[in-house]
Image (tube, rainbow, N blue to C red):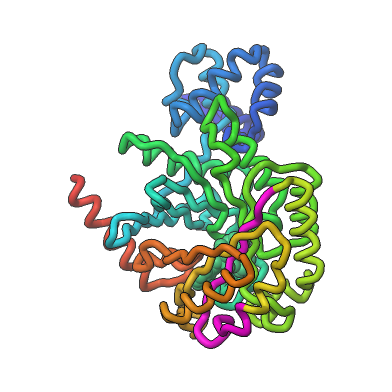
Amino acid sequence: MNLTADRATIAEMDSTPTVNLYDLSRAALEEMLAAWGYSSYYAGQVWANLYRRLATSVGEMTELRPQLAERLAAEAIIGVPQTQAIIHSADGHTSKFLLGLADGQAIETVLMYFRGRATACVSTQVGCAMGCVFCATGQMGFRRHLTPGEIVGQVAYVARLLRERGEMLRNIVLMGMGEPLHNYDATMAALETVMDHRGLAIAPRFITLSTVGVVPGIRRLAAEAQPFRLAVSLHGATDEERARLVPPARRWPLAELIAACRHYSETLRRRIFFEWALIDGQNDSPAQAHALGRLLHGLNAHVNLIPLNPTIGYDGRPTEATAVKAFQAVLAGYGLPSTVRQRRGIDVAAGCGQLATDPLRLAAANQGRASDRSAAG
Ligand code: SAH
Ligand code: SF4
């Protein structure tokens, strides 16, 4: 064996940056391949392998010229996240995945059936800087932003799993870990990729971005006429009450937030969804429902009421069903439509961040996974 040559090869490999193909827009992929001497036809082949065939490695890609396959294998990877744990809800409607990233961090991705349609709930950050008190992700604090490829990787992961069952991924909600508008560029890049009609082709009307209310981000969405749905997490109808649950309320007061929402809704002629986690004795009184009705008056709005999903770090309880109905009735009096979202599969900790932060649930999930494996094997 020629040690010197081997060392040289290793040094060469180390100096060649490895690109995660999921990080590249279609244009960037075309550019990279053009620099290697391949026309856009070849970029189209690679793109189809990534997002139509859902290849998990360069080796799995089909119909590539051998030289192109070789170069891709040397310089690129497909950043498929690693399954660390899976839990399925008892009702079979929700599966939650703890996925490991290249640097050892873990995120959560959820597959749920919403009105019979397969929906991927995707993370945009590891942890979150916003610190909402009832949220498991908020309780863990901010670790880092996800790259576009790490966001795309979650969507491809769920799409692949569904395809094995003969199903298609239809909806995406950015309601996993993290605040998408705090990681604006990566989130938009990832959505552009998953919407591409030559790839995963998820229609923008089936993509919902949920934000805690980052005002500059909402204004930017409007200015750029981004095509997907917007959901804003409100949880309080006065600055004081909201700030107790959602600390960013101090930075972006309701007057500014609602003005930005109004601007968004009028500019793009679109309805906005407002999320309200109903917490017993905190934000579920008829007076608070009246305040919400007044706050959203005249806006093209729909309210999603979500009885709190309990987390370890917060001792609040979900609102009882009768009080939920009463709250809804008050909103109806303002002509404000609302839906009660029973969190599907509450037994799998469907609130974001709960799998990553709750050691007991994680242990149970790992056990479940071990028994899945033994059942399969
Ligand atoms: N950061 C974004 C998106 C992720 S959170 C946002 O805050 O909107 C997605 C939704 O789940 C938000 O409406 C959030 O308020 C809600 N949520 C978080 N933890 C929850 C819990 N324990 N119970 C009910 N809803 C929760
Ligand atoms: Fe972050 Fe959203 Fe959780 Fe608030 S609710 S801490 S913004 S993930």
Q: What are the residue bounds of the magenta stretch?
A: 270-289
Q: Nearer the viewer, residue 206 or 196?
A: 206
Given residues 79 and 216, the one toward you in this image is 216
Observer-nearest residue: 315 or 150? Answer: 315
Query: Looking at the image, which residue is at 41% across and 54% down?
Result: 97
Query: What's the residue at 37%, 35% (across, down)?
Result: 163
Identify the residue at image location x=54%, y=13%.
67
> Splitting the image into four quadrants, where does ligand 1 fall?
bottom right
Q: Residue furthest bottom?
A: 281
Figure quadrant of the C terminus: top left
Q: Is residue 285 magenta?
A: yes
Question: Would residue 356 be visible to someone looking at this image?
Answer: no
Q: Tell me: 284 left or right of 168.
A: right
- Residue 142 is a magenta residue: no
Residue 336 image offset from top left, x and y in percent: 61, 65
User: 186 and 289: which one is in front?
Assistant: 289
- Spot occupied by residue 258 in the image (x, y as percentages of width and height): 76, 65
